[in-house]
Amino acid sequence: MTDDQLKLARRYLAQAKRVVIFTGAGISAESGVPTFRGSDATWKGMPAAVASSLGLLEQDLTTAWEWFDYRRTLLKAVSPNAAHVAVAQAESCFAEFLVVTQNVDGLHQKAGSKHIIELHGNIWRGRGLRTGKRYDLPETPLPTLPPRGDADEPIRPDVVLFGEMLPAGAFEEAELAAMRCDACLVIGTSGVVYPAALIPLAARDAGAAVIEVNPEATDLTPHVTLSLRGRAGDIVPQLFE
Ligand code: BJW
């Protein structure tokens, strides 16, 4: 990232009244949370994509929960980093400010962000298999797997797996905000998962300045107004100084 790029990005944000922050796993990387792609990590011999699949959840809910509760235990120990904090602190500086995250880790909330849409759910919640009722599940490790809700209904993790619909209304609300915003800051996402990746594209199509923060080029790079190459924890705090 050059000084001129940083100045330009700051100017876009300083002129904006309505801002959408679109985040992916990369914003949590410096907190110690693994990203999804570019790693061949396995759990119990399974690639993460298999452990996080609808197939496993439908065939073996207990093993699926072991995977999610393993990750919940790792997450319990991590804290928001400078990028989450800068995003949370910026919220009060704009007339409209919305965080649209693909992350399930809850670190935006932990940093103090108030207006958040979670497109892919939240790992600290469960959802009843029979009723769809949501349950807060802050405890980890969980005492029983799978956890049970009202009338003993089995609970699944309240996250969105490939082939599943996003939470009702979440994408539509995020898309409306994107279409109304003046600036959209895209932090730490590969931009390969849909429909989430349509959010920055909707902002761009509606004429907003779209600023990407990522150490690598992504599928979104050709479509953004400005790409800032580097780590979120280094760059994002400088954007709102
Ligand atoms: C840094 C950094 C630092 C590193 N600073 N940056 C065929 C069949 C079925 C579906 C489809 C299909 N073809 C297409 C689809 C749709 C599918 C999809 O998009 N597939 C594509 C992959 C091909 N989408 C869906 O299925 C979605 N639902 C849907 O479409 O419903 C309609 C429908 C219904 C029925 C049938 C068909 C359609 C649902 C998507 C759910 C995604 N779920 C996951 C898992 C969540 C649970 C869990 O945690 O286990 O969500 S997948 C995973 O990817 C996770 C993430 O939110 C998501 C996005 O990843 P993200 O955040 O971008 O992370 P990475 O790792 O990819 O990138 C990290 C980035 O950070 C990199 O760029 C780094 O460079 C950068 N970085 N360090 C800043 N320090």
Image (cartoon, rainbow, N blue to C red):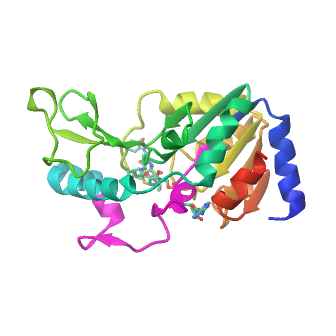
Q: Quadrant of residue 50?
A: bottom left
On screen, 6 above or below 90? below
Segment tinted magenta in the rendering: 22-51
Tell me the quarter of the image containing the N terminus. Answer: bottom right
Instruction: Where is residue 63? Give x, y as percent.
Output: 18, 57
Rendered residue at 14%/37% (across/down): 148
Residue lying at the far left in this picture: please name it: 152
Say whether residue 195 is visible. Answer: no
Q: Tell whether 74 sits left or right of 57.
A: right
Q: Quadrant of residue 158?
A: top left
Instruction: Where is residue 13? Give x, y as percent.
Output: 80, 41
Rendered residue at 14%/27% (across/down): 150
Q: Tell whether 48 sits left or right of 60.
A: right
Q: Tell whether 15 sits left or right of 206.
A: right
* Viewer-closest of 58 and 189: 189
On screen, 38 above or below 93? below
* Viewer-closest of 126 and 138: 138
Rendered residue at 79%/54% (across/down): 226
Q: Decide whether residue 162 is among the magenta residues.
A: no
Rendered residue at 38%/55% (across/down): 75
